[in-house]
Image (cartoon, grey):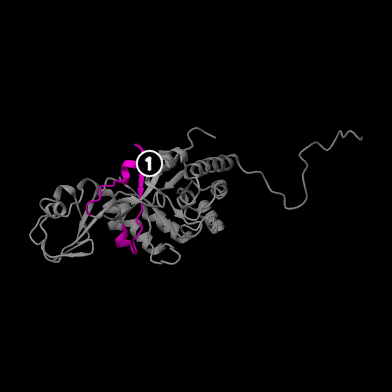
Amino acid sequence: MSSNDSLILGGRAFSSRFILGSGKYSVDLIRSAIECAGAQIITLAVRRANTNTTENILTHIPEGITLLPNTSGARNAEEAVRIARLARELGCGDFVKIEVIRDTKYLLPDNAETVKATEILAREGFIVMPYMYPDLNTARDLANAGAAAIMPLGAPIGSNKGLCTRDFIQILIDEIDLPIIVDAGIGRPSQACEAMEMGVAAIMANTAIATARDIPAMASAFKKAIEAGRIAYLSGLGRVLDKGADASSPLTGFLSN
Amino acid sequence: MITLNGRAVDDANGLSLAELLARENYVISIIAVACNQEVVPRAKYNCTQLADGDVIDVVRMVAGG
């Protein structure tokens, strides 16, 4: 693999292709999870602050890690835009993961509102990474709206069900000239590896790590799987035979001849 | 009356945003504020006067995916 195989987002180069979520586990484990994941980008959320609260999650995140605030809680584009602006005011920088969700049962993204929010925030200089249901038309709209990457779901958020939308993600990989990052649903390192083998640019995972028995160790397993999948993709996967077999050892010079 | 994070606050009219946040014991370094859905830069907390009907949202970063 080339040493300059970087993930480029908003003009910035990342050597890691694992975007780690910080939700659902102790903040005390965030630092070791980041280190074991080799992650350079971590997601965060914006929520109402309680009075007297002094806890600052940013103190648990090592220097140099890029913060990727999400707009979770937004039910439309307007709310997503407001959350993104607040995140920037909180010192998170210009990266933002757009999440617009009004379906509370399956937590599926609202693609149309996501396009609207992307257009507004990209115009304001944000590096916009929209979470979306894998639909080619929407992905094209997001690209035209100024998205820096496209983040299709593999399965419902937090489900750990894997690549349920595999064929549709493949269409995005084939047709969209932006990094495709699978966000949501990836539950196992093998599923992350499979997505990387397909040619996705990166994996975003949270629940798979957060609900593992050993969080840092699972972060490490994902790191290795994502790297393996990337190398496999760049190496060009071997062909598959429709029928029959193809011996790997010579078919001449047998001892019995 | 103003609304602070969804809670009615009766005696804030005429206060500056900075005074309200101090009175409510917010830690300024870890919060961001929107007034009537517009982000208020930290440098403007002192000169932002609260008026009847204002809706204030005070937020911070938390863990999330």
Q: Quadrant of the C terminus of chain A?
A: top right
Toward the viewer: A81 or A207? A207
Residue situated furthest right in the rendering: A257
**Residue B53 shown left or right of residue A241 in the figure:** left
Residue A56: say if magenta. Answer: yes
A250 to A43, vertically: above or below: above
Q: Which residues are magenta?
A: A51-80
Residue receiving disc 1 = A11
Does residue A131 belong to the magenta stretch? no
Secondary structure under tag 1 reads loop
Most extreme residue toward the left, as rendered? B14
Q: Quadrant of the N terminus of chain A?
A: top right
**Coordinates of residue A85 in the picture (x, y in percent):** 27, 53
**Amino acid, disc 1:** Gly
Q: Position of residue A23 (x, y in %)?
A: 40, 51
Query: Crowding near pointer 1: few (<14 within 10 Å), some, many (20+)?
Result: few
Residue A58 in percent (x, y) is at 31, 44
> Secondary structure of the magenta portion, mostly?
loop
Q: At 80% from the left edge and 36% from the top edge, which residue is drawn?
A: A250
Question: Which chain is home to disc 1?
Answer: A
Residue A76 image offset from top left, x and y in percent: 33, 64
